[in-house]
Amino acid sequence: MARFPKPPEGSWTEHYPDLGTDPVSYEDSISPEFYEVERKAVFKRAWLNVGRVEQLPRKGSYFTKELKVANTSIIVVRTTSGEVKAYHNICRHRGNKLVWNDMPLEETSGVCRQFTCKYHAWRYDLDGHLTFVQQEGEFFDLDKSRYGLVPVHCDVWEGFIFVNFAPEPEQSLRDFLGPMITGLEGYPFAEMTSRFYYRSEVKANWKLYMDAFQEFYHAPILHANQSPSTFSKAAAEAGFEAPHYRIDGPHRLVSTSGIRAWEMDPDMRKPMEDICQSGLFGPWDKPDLGPMPEGLNPAKCEPWGLDSFQLFPNFVILIWGQGWYLTYHYWPTSFNTHIFEGTLYFPQPRTPRERIAQELAAVSFKEYGLQDANTLEATQTMVEARAVNEFLLCDQEVLIRHLHKETAAWVDDYRRKTAEVGAP
């Protein structure tokens, strides 16, 4: 879909006529049957981000990722040649999970020269080759070269590690990302190594939480208590509208301006923000990161607040004009539960004050995230009641329309292709 500037008398939704303007159904968020197809149609075919290369700082560094939506656990490792590879986390002998610590369902990380199974001590090198079998002579016609770890398609873009569970991906990672996302190339992601991480188990469908971060129509209302009362009242009365929305293939973007009333008026600032010189938008001292890529701030907002890039299916890169970024992941665990991960990335602090400023931004983000999540379980339970089957969306919720329509398109495409080959 093309990018359009919004005329004064027009609407964003009208620029994308395929999305329509009718009320939408949330059946895709409450149906166990739809979820089972969605797992195969979307999460076993799309490229999924599972981490960053900074998690693998040297040869032999690894981490595991539990992916219930794909019914698997994977190992992501930096090999002796420096390449990043991924494998299913299973020993070829008796099927034991290969890499885990005390609790087999918990994720772990570390550094090693080889992977050794806890059960019978079979060993695999970092390239996945089976190198040692305990009492090898007891086996019948064992050819170790045939029993290496099962690989998972893996590729890296701008330091982000992606995997794909299809037998053969339908697109390369770069083609899947498309020009809107690859337009971010050159942003100093690798310089943002000060990291804050949050994880939460949410009793709601993953798409409902994505919806919460795809529009700012809710901001003056839901987050009213987080902002100074004078600002909140004015924002609630005037409403809020983002200056730019864009859709590119399966991915979406929303941009906002950067006007911060509490920074312009000392009476509207919180004492803690004055002390720490920081707040939700990040530390007030913006770092010099050099020239920014053309893909940022496509609306040319001045001042510019943020760009939220929604990568299909479940990954968000949100870049702040203040010189830092955060990511969201939404990992389904059932039709009405998922795991939410929020990670904030800043340049390494040079002083204790800079560190404290980053920590305040991280805490402020957590509070906003809790406010957004607070509505989700109530939404899920009431939508599941099916007393109402269609829901109204305004022009600012155009990206919500797109996510649900795109998910349905992937499911329809999967059903058509599997029917053609006679698959169940």
Image: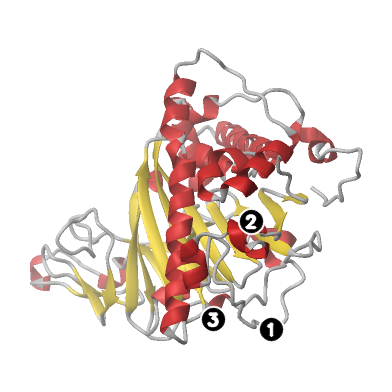
Q: Is residue 64 left or right of residue 204?
A: left
Task: Return the disc, 2 or 1, that comes first in the chain's sequence.
Answer: 1
Corner quadrant of residue 235: top right
Q: Residue furthest top?
A: 387
Which residue corresponds to mark 2? Answer: 308
Query: Crowding near pointer 1: few (<14 within 10 Å), some, many (20+)?
Result: few
Q: Position of residue 410 (x, y in %)?
A: 61, 39
**Mark 3 or mark 1: which comes first in sequence?**
3
Kindly tell me whether residue 330 is visible in this rendering: no
For the point 17% across and 67% down, the residue is 117
Q: Amino acid at mark 3?
A: Glu
Relative to residue 136, is residue 339 drawn left or right?
right
Q: Do we see residue 136 in this rendering?
A: yes
At 91% from the left and 43% from the top, the residue drawn is: 8
Compute the Cα span from label 2 to label 1. 20 Å
**Residue at horizontal 14%, vertical 61%?**
102
Q: Position of residue 120 (x, y in %)?
A: 10, 65
Q: Is residue 166 above or below residue 284?
A: above
Amino acid tagged 2:
Ser
Secondary structure beneath label 2? strand
Which residue shows up at 63% across the image and 56% down it? 308
Q: Dot 2, how many residues are within 10 Å of its Cα: few (below 14), some (14-19), or many (20+)? A: many
Q: Which residue is mark 1?
A: 290
Residue at which label 3 appears: 191
